Amino acid sequence: MEKSLKAVALQHDMGIRPTHSIRDLQRDLLAANIDAGLAEEECELLDSIFVGSKYPGDSAFADFPPDQSVAAKCVKLAERVVTTAQRLLIDPRPI
């Protein structure tokens, strides 16, 4: 998702800041009138699981261990974001 959102930002000649936060990337796109289709609470969920576990401050563990239903929800979110990003890369007009 992170790379997909950054690709959309680059397609729209937006600078991309060095972040792994889905929320920050989504907010940057929204500020440019580009909707990647993520709600604020979805960004919060994704960041709470993946940013903390992939880029830990003090711990190698996520903020909470996702169970099967949370993992399935995140996979669906990822599929939706990647599909939206692919569409935006083909037709770069802001939506």
Image (cartoon, helix red, strand yellow):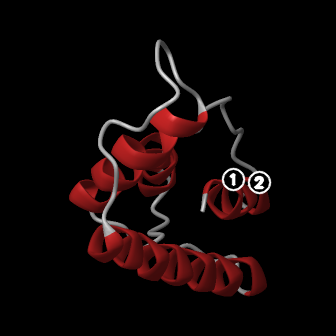
What residue occupies the far left of the structure in this picture? 41
Residue found 53% across the figure and 24% down from its top: 56
Residue 91 image point, x, y percent = 71, 85
Q: In the rendered view of the protein, which quadrant contains the N terminus?
A: bottom right
- Crowd class of label 2 (few under 14; some 14 to 19; many from 20; radius 10 Å): few
Residue at left offset 71%, top offset 38%: 15
Q: Which three-letter amino acid code belongs to the residue tagged 2?
A: Leu
Q: Is residue 34 above or below residue 79?
A: above
Note whether 84 is above or below 7 in the view shown: below
Can residue 62 be seen from the camera position used here?
yes
Marks 2 and 1 close (CB-CB < 8 Å): yes
Q: Which residue occupies the foreground of this view, 90 or 85? A: 85
Q: Quick one: SS at disc 2? A: helix
Foreground tag (2 vs 1): 1
Q: CA distance from mark 2 to mark 1?
A: 6 Å
Write down the quadrant of residue 7 in the picture. Answer: bottom right
Q: Indicate the secondary structure of the residue bearing disc 1.
A: helix
Mark 1: which amino acid? Lys
Q: Residue at left 48%, top 70%? A: 36
Residue 79, position as x, y percentages in the image: 54, 82
Query: How many C-alpha atoms fall within 10 Å of the one at disc 1: few (<14), some, or many (≥20)?
Result: many
Residue 73 falls left or right of residue 81 = left
Residue wearing tag 2? 10
Residue at position x 34%, y 42% from top? 48
Percent x, y for residue 62?
41, 38
Residue bearing mark 1: 6
Horizontally, residue 7 falls left or right of residue 29, namely right
**Residue 11 location in percent, x, y?**
77, 62
Residue 40, disc: none
Along the viewing direction, whichever of 88 and 39 lies nearer the viewer: 39
33 on left or right of 38: right
